[in-house]
Image (cartoon, helix red, strand yellow):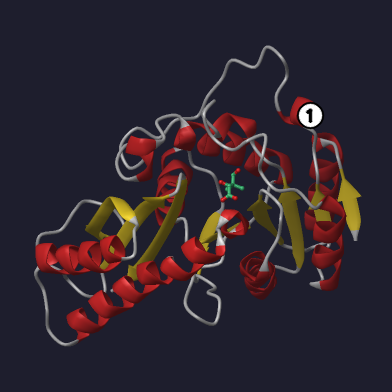
Amino acid sequence: MNVFTTAAALHAWSVAQKRDGHTVALVPTMGYLHEGHLSFIREARRHCSKVAVSIFVNPTQFAPNEDYDAYPHKEEDDIALCEAEGADAVFLPQPAEMYPEDASTWVEETVLSKGYCGAQRPIHFRGVCTVVAKLFNIAAPDVAVFGQKDFQQVAVIRRMVRDLNFPIQIIRAPIIRDEDGLAKSSRNTYLSPDARKAALSLSKALFAAKAAVEAGERDAATLEAMIRTTTTAEGWIPDYVNVVDSETLMPLKTVHPGNAAILLACRREGLRLIDNVLL
Ligand code: PAF
């Protein structure tokens, strides 16, 4: 497996793979890899003959009050995990490689990125779109894999890819959960044992709402109220709970199964978790 630290080296590798008749998939990550990321590598392999994983904690998607400096790192382990999973290349740039000191260009999606997490984190998706656009230009992938756990992120990136004509297929890989239902996240490491236990109320509430839809419930307000009650009872304060159109992210009043999702973000003890379920 190749480990690249410069954009030029990854780009040259990708171009050479394509010249040799391969297709290239990119799995963008911020490292601290867990089973969810490894499932993205496997998903990438189903679509392409070569898989590159980027590991970069992107400073521009963190506001000054967020956890950029504390974001967990374990680069050596991450490289070993990528290798064990059969990745062909890892891209591990330093911030200066990605952002020249006088960088002054942003990529911003202006509609889907504004609500939900975007309302709480106003500069977040501008940073995500900018770094993902850069990674797409550097790695020139045919396919890129992102996790469903960041549902809004995938919708925003799909919109960016459509609007800016990136010739890249975006795959939304399913959420990987711990056995008890908690969606895997690098930030779960911040949870105290009590908060970890109480966090199960998020997935429990989402699964109960999905079951209610399967049993015939169609009223979005009823489903949202069910979820708020369950999560609040465990000390999680919802930032938002919304039944939405799964592509446009527009809030729905009535659920249309097959084309809807429930998105939620909750806070407790200074921590914020997100989760979602497709209906
Ligand atoms: O989902 C993430 O880990 C990040 O937002 C991404 C897509 C790697 C961009 O930094």
Q: Is residue 246 visible?
A: no
Q: Quadrant of residue 135?
A: top right
Q: Where is residue 77 drawn, in percent x and y? A: 84, 60
Q: Where is residue 226 drawn, in percent x and y? A: 18, 69
Q: Quadrant of the N terminus?
A: bottom right
Q: Quadrant of residue 100?
A: top right
What amino acid type is highlighted by mark number 1?
A: Glu
Report the residue at 79% width, 42% height from top.
Answer: 11
Query: Is 210 situated left or right of 93 in this image?
Result: left
Circle 1 sits in a helix, a strand or a loop, which is it?
helix
Instruction: Quickly name the residue at label 1.
Output: 97
Q: Where is residue 222 drawn, in percent x and y? A: 11, 68
Front one among 139 and 108: 108
Q: Is residue 28 above or below residue 217?
A: above
Report the residue at 56% width, 66% height from top.
Answer: 184
Query: Is 238 situated left or right of 92 in this image?
Result: left
Q: Quadrant of residue 115?
A: top left
Most extreme residue toward the bottom is 215
